[in-house]
Amino acid sequence: MTTAAPSSKVTGPKGQPSRIGGARPSHLVTTGGSGAIVDLPGISVIVKGTESWPLERAETIVEPRLLEKIRATLGPQVNALHTAPWDPQDTDDPWTRTGVPVSPFPRWLRCPACHRLGPLDPPGQFDLVHRYGRRPDLAKFVHTTCQKQTQKAARNKRACLPARFLVACDAGHLDDFPYVDFVHSGRTEPCGGPKLVLRDSSSTLGPRVTITCVECSSARNVSQASGRDGWEALPVCRGRHPHLQKFEPCGRNLRLMVLGASNLWFSITASALHLPQSQTVADIVSANWEVLGPQPNEAVVGLLVGQLDSLRALRDSKTSEVWSAIEALKASGGPVDAPPQTDLLRAEWDLLSHPTTQKQDDDFRAVPISGPDGYNHLLQQVVLVSRLREVQALVGFTRLTAPDRRELDPGNRLSLSRTNSPKWVPAFEQRGEGIFLELPEPRVRQWERQVSEHPRILAMQDAFARWSANRDRPVDTTLPIPRFLLLHTLSHLLIRQVALECGYGSSSIRERIYVGTTAEPATGILLSTAASDSEGTLGGLVALGQPQHLKRLLDNALVDAQRCSSDPICAEHVPEDPSDTLHAAACHACLFASETSCETGNRWLDRAVVVELTGDNLAFLR
């Protein structure tokens, strides 16, 4: 069965691809794409590489700015952005080939009845039970030879649980925990036929997870492989990429991981807002030069404009005007390709900070309005974005350590496919709405100069240096730390307030921070929400941008910024050596937002840069 959400597949007993679950297209880009472990109701699976994704049912997303950015990262051979494959007809076929292919991972299972711990390979010990076309959530693995369930039919046996321990290395390799080698480590005589059981128990000293071999009575606690020195109890990494089904030389130290850990997969994504282009006749002719340039006369051009949908925008113009534009371009040697713009945020900032009715279409509408009373010192401009379209593409992923803000090529980036030169990348598009807030640049620049040597700012700079060194990355000296702290903290304060009133959950409200560069500074925040439906969202967020509502939100946000249930610990927190924490007065009780909302993983936050907390003259609002 296939629904509007892409389905997943595993190989069944007879080799057929069997549908065993579903996921949203956005999920396959942001939190569960290629290389990620996905917990389905009865099975844990890993999403395979994109080279095995069937593209027959995939749609192509057109967003030239984003495509150029990805080409600059992955190479010029990337020629398309594709959605995940899906079947709009919602077929009942449980063996459908439409969907994203997955395979069971980890490959070790535990029977909840007899505690037997064993691998899926070789087959025979565990079987996949999946007979329900419209209930893929009932797919499960059962222990075929379980002595405590001998009287039960396979479909009535208890579902086996995925073994909850994995190992990973700093290079991003992921593998099953080496249960057999771990239990038999140090044994002088080989075990004739390892048969493992796993039992959990608890004590006042903490949880105890013991693995025992019933054949030779060897036993060991998994806690011996945990901690800073746990690698000493493990073999070296064998370089496995389970999503690509390949191995490569490695030999690094392994780290014990728990299934479901948040640092097993971090997406590396690039996103861009749709920006309407000017619609002059010359611009349209230039964009369609391959069709219009070779035409011999005005009459042929008139026929093409009337027949081709790609030239629909020229039908309101006179044919003579179109022909004049063609002749003018021919005389100048043809259109000159503009250099690709790799800074996606710069073009968005230019349009949002100077909205105009000449640059609007069905996917972008922005109208400036007056700001709330009493906040002229904080806000330069408020823009209501009643229509926006965002396209987000998956470039790669990392394990163990998250990429930095908008970093597309970190040193530990892992590939989505076997080839290092992919021709396409997964993407999805959403339509929605937003509120854009611009702060006064002169006042922000003056405040930056005043606080550049403040102890809290210097502490954040030192923590950033330690953070970069611990991850073998160069320090980004172009990041304006005070400015980013101010904009990012204000953004999180407003996200928490907006979520209480607009009708959308806080996890569905996203931020885009515009700080610019030293040469071209920017001071903007875009709070937006979007949905995959073609109609977008319902206007609840834009309504809060009206002066009377925005004033209430700002009032409440600034009051909340002055207190936290964790004060004074939260207010007085400053990262000190050896800590590489990139936040100061911020915690889950006051500023942290969900993973889907924040651009930086809740880094670069400090309430003290917005309002006075400790009386040290740091706050922007005094």
Image: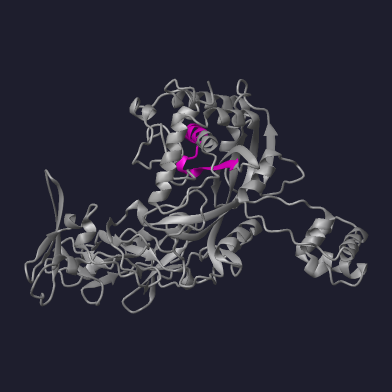
* Left or right relative to 228: residue 364: right
Q: Position of residue 393 (x, y in %)?
A: 54, 58
Q: For this rendering, which residue is in front, 193 or 347?
A: 347
Residue at the extreme front of the image, as rendered: 453
Q: Quadrant of residue 270?
A: bottom right
What colour scheme governs how the chains and residues are painted in the rendered image of this protein?
A: one colour
In this orientation, does residue 606 appear? no
* Left or right relative to 557: residue 590: left
15 vs 614: above or below: below
The region drawn magenta spans: 489-515
Which quadrant is the N terminus positioned in?
bottom left
472 vs 455: above or below: below
Q: For this rendering, which residue is in front, 435 or 540?
A: 435
Residue 207 among magenta residues:
no
Q: Residue at x 65, y 51 (%)?
A: 274
Q: Residue at x 61, y 43 (%)?
A: 517
Q: Position of residue 478 (x, y in %)?
A: 55, 45
